[in-house]
Image (cartoon, helix red, strand yellow):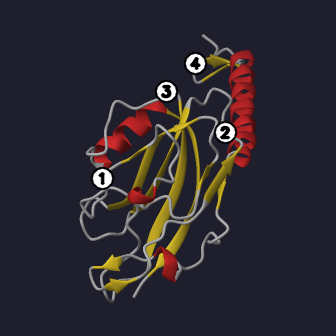
């Protein structure tokens, strides 16, 4: 019995073309989408070193511990809320280090003002929540890697979510918040900074 010349790997040529075309659409749409959703800060240049303002004050570091201004745009149209995280995947803990977690940011908000990480200042948007960092408290905790380590990466990310609120409070851990962010993520934008001492 001769093999059907139109069958390749159990799929007809017509089906292969359709699948290929669909993959092309997904790739192009993904590229356009990824380019639209952006996160920026006037205090920081992506890929540069963390400045004195954003460094932690404690653990042997003497920074100002001021969270930067963050601005974002181009989120997916179905976005119902945002979250912002700052994470160090290089911390010698086996699980990284959460430096800042803000969630339940209304979908109409596209900025966190400089200094919003100071909980007492009350600068975060109404309804938003600042979760517990790996320093043990809420609010922003700046960079402070161990002395002599290769510079760590600090990943600033804004998450577009498909729900208005997460069922969490300020005592939620970074791991728990991260779990819910991934469950409800429509997209994310971000940049990375570095710091070593």
Secondary structure state at the residue bearing disc 1:
loop
The first of marks 1 and 4 along the sequence is 4
Numbered mark located on residue 75 in the image: 2
Q: In the image, which disc is placed on residue 132?
A: 1
Disc tally is: 4
Q: How far is the residue under mark 4 from the one under mark 3?
A: 41 Å
- Specify the label residue 93 is tagged with: none
- Residue 109 location, x and y as percent? 62, 41
Residue at point 48% right, 70% down?
Answer: 66
Which mark is first along the chain, 4 or 2? 4
> Where is residue 62 drawn, in percent x and y?
37, 85
In the depicted structure, whether residue 84 falls above or below residue 151: above
Q: Secondary structure at mark 3?
A: loop
Q: Is the residue 103 above or below the residue 137 in the image?
A: above
Q: Earlier in the sequence, mark 3 or mark 1?
A: 1
Which element is circle 2 on?
loop
Residue drawn where x is 37% and y is 44% of the image: 178
**Pointer 4: residues within 10 angstroms few (<14), some, or many (20+)?**
few
Of residues 181 and 11, which is closer to you in this image? 181
Q: Is residue 57 positioned above or below 86 on the image? A: below
- Near mark 1 (Cα within 10 A), the count class, few <14, some 14-19 or many ≥20, is many
Which of discs 4 and 3 lies nearer the camera? The answer is: 3
Distance between the alpha carbons at the discs numbered 2 and 4: 39 Å
Q: SS of the residue at dot 4?
A: loop
């Amino acid at each position: 019995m001769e093999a059907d010349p139109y069958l390749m790997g159990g799929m007809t040529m017509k089906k292969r073309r359709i699948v290929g075309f669909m993959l092309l659409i997904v790739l192009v749409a993904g590229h356009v989408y990824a380019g639209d959703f952006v996160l920026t800060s006037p205090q920081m240049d992506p890929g540069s070193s963390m400045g004195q303002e954003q460094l932690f004050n404690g653990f042997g570091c003497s920074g100002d511990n001021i969270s930067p201004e963050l601005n974002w745009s181009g989120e997916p149209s179905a976005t119902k809320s945002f979250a912002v995280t700052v994470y160090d995947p290089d911390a010698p803990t086996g699980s990284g280090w959460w430096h800042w977690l803000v969630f339940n940011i209304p979908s109409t908000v596209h900025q966190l003002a400089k200094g919003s990480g100071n909980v007492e200042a009350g600068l975060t948007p109404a309804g938003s929540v600042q979760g517990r960092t790996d320093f043990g408290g809420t609010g922003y905790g700046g960079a402070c890697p161990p002395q002599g380590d290769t510079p760590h990466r600090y990943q600033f990310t804004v998450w577009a979510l498909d729900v208005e609120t997460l069922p969490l409070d300020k005592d939620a851990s970074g791991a728990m918040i991260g779990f819910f962010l991934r469950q409800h993520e429509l997209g994310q934008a971000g940049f990375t900074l570095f710091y070593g001492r």
